[in-house]
Image (cartoon, rainbow, N blue to C red):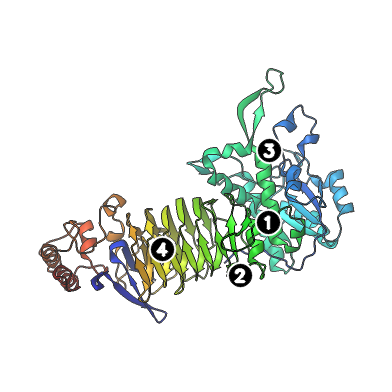
Amino acid sequence: MKDSKIKTFIHDDKTYFVFPSILLIAFIISCFFPSSVFADVKTSGRIWIAGDSIAADHSYEKEEDYADFVHGWGEVLENYLTDNVQVFNKAISGQSAKYFVEENNYKDIMSGISEGDILLIQFGHNDYKSDGSNHYSLPTTTEGSYKWYLKNYYIDPALNAGAIPVLCTSVVCCEFVDGIVRENQPQSLFAGAMRELYNEYRDAGINIGLIDTYELTQTMLNAYSSSASSFYAVKYDRSGGTAGNRSTSLDHVHFSLKGAKMTAGMIAENLFLLYPDFNRFNRQNIIDGGDGTEGNPYEISSFSQIYRILRDNKMNKENIFYKLTKDLDPVIQNKECKDILYANIDFGGHTIKNAVGRVQSSLFDKNYGIISNLSLSYSINHTCEDIQYPLVNENYGVIRNCTASGYIWYDCFLKNREEWNCGIFAGVNRVSGEIYNCSSNINMTVNTDIPRTIVGGITGKNEGSIYKCENNGKLKLDMTEYSLNNNKVHEIVHCICSGIAGISSYSSKITDCKSILLPTVMTTLKSDKQIVLSDLNFINESAVTEINDKKGDIDLDGEVSLSDATEILKYALNIAEPDKKKFFIADINSDGEINLTDANSALQLALGII
């Protein structure tokens, strides 16, 4: 790439260059949510379940044929555990956190629970019903509220018994609006109340668990949007008095056997993650086969195996090789530990759906090994205060032969964050990092208020090497809402969005890469102190896709000629006025104006000097 196609700027004592042909830069006015991991917690192998119909064992229901089409996750939790685990499923259909305490099943839990036992608590599906029933409570902290009952009748008694209380948020209903799970579901308020309660205990230094089954089931349904209903029960039609005649009516709340297994698997996997000691009861071995060599890698088939390997210093080494043997679904939630991969994982061409989303910041925090043959599939609509890195936060190793497809919509408004490097395969590709033969077909929109946001189709920031990579997805960096509503003044806001790498250091290499669709940057704020490219940022996408990779090529014939240089000189001297598309092409150094510097660069390109 010629020097004239490089724009430089200084940041943190480092010089970076950017590629203007696929870059818009706007200069305008200028926490993590961890889940506790308790490595020293000793578990007994006894699990108690307090909950409603979502967890209940429906094989004991009296209603005719009810158990044939509705299943609770508590029925099948044992499928993921060894035979020496005892599961006491005391959940009852129709119950709320408030009313369940009147039941004998609640008394059984309180009289039987002991040190090291796990108490899984899931309500919220009946608690919001304000139809005059005794179940209704408010999702607040006042006496008699949902949180008050959870604290005083479940969490504190379990802690006093030496047990481990684990909050499981209410699951989503199978209701879609415009292709995604409907957000404003009544039980979402009670899921939020559980999260708040968990945070209150965490901030007080008291260890309890949280498995955000609301977020997890929402992520799962969005991943399977076209067939999401298969996780939920189809009702029997008893209108004619004949049991066993299925209707087309979908039970949007209760699970089919498939949905019950989905949720039970989520809960089991997260228990293994939260409490390493509990892995003694994991039905799945740490490896399925192989000897760990490159020619005969260890075989793995679950997220829990991956995370167990990451935390085992003997298994997580650069000379050990693993191979995934099946596709994986999104079942792991946000985690406190920073998982670093030193070993090598061949994903065997298998797909991981929504590897990161609302409930997790990255699949791997840092990679020093080799990640290969992975297919990523996304369908994410994400709103939170978490910075996101879809695959790897920082890559020091090798990512090769990987693909990504689908869509990602991030709405990340963060606290005390000054920089975000976001790329499909790596947030930052470090000096030793190599990304080879990877392609992205992700349509990604990043809506953010971070003053320095850098988005790339392959990586956000590149300090290493990128070879033979391709981006075919549309990228949009949208700071419109930030521009309109943020009162905090930043001296400079860098909004950078590029097809391959947002920014690259001079020592880095990008070879044989291409980006078919150009990105857009959107903002509305204007200031006398900064150069503003608002008009350019609103180039419509149909126009952007027609612009080729060469700055200065006004007539779009594939090369910069003397006629192109002459046209740019006319723009610089105000003899002629370009339209928006030609302005973007003529502004070779992307400083927001067309001047003699751009004309000179175009002339040198035309003469082959640069």
SS under mark 2: loop
Disc number for residue 455: 4
Q: Given the image, on which type of amino acid does mark 2 rest?
A: Lys
Query: Could you tell me how far apart the alpha carbons at marks 1 and 4 are, in whole angstroms?
Result: 31 Å
Q: Given the image, on which type of amino acid does mark 3 rest?
A: Leu
Q: Going from the N terminus, do you reach mark 1 or mark 2 first? A: 1
Side (left or right) of 194 relative to 83: left
Q: Which image quadrant: the C terminus?
A: bottom left
Q: Residue at x 19, y 70 (%)?
A: 598
**Which is closer to the viewer, label 1 or label 2?**
2
**Residue 221 appears at what percent x and percent y?**
57, 44
Residue 15 vs 294, above or below: the answer is: below
Q: Given the image, on which type of amino acid does mark 1 rest?
A: Asn
SS under mark 3: helix
Looking at this view, is 55 or 368 the one in front? 368
Looking at this view, is 533 or 336 the one in front? 336
SS under mark 1: helix
Q: Which residue is mark 3?
A: 257
Query: Could you tell me how far apart the alpha carbons at marks 2 and 4 are, in whole angstroms?
Result: 31 Å
**Which is closer to the viewer, label 2 or label 3?**
2
Q: Which residue is mark 2?
A: 317
Looking at this view, is 207 or 89 the one in front? 89
Side (left or right) of 454 relative to 575: right
**Which is closer to the viewer, label 4 or label 3?**
3
Residue 328 visible within the image: yes
Side (left or right) of 583 relative to 109: left
Q: Going from the N terminus, do you reach mark 4 or mark 3 first? A: 3
Query: Could you tell me how far apart the alpha carbons at marks 4 and 3 are, in whole angstroms?
Result: 41 Å
Q: Going from the N terminus, do you reach mark 1 or mark 3 first? A: 3
Query: Could you tell me how far apart the alpha carbons at marks 1 and 3 are, in whole angstroms?
Result: 20 Å
Q: List the single residue furthest toward the right.
A: 111
Q: Which residue is mark 1?
A: 270
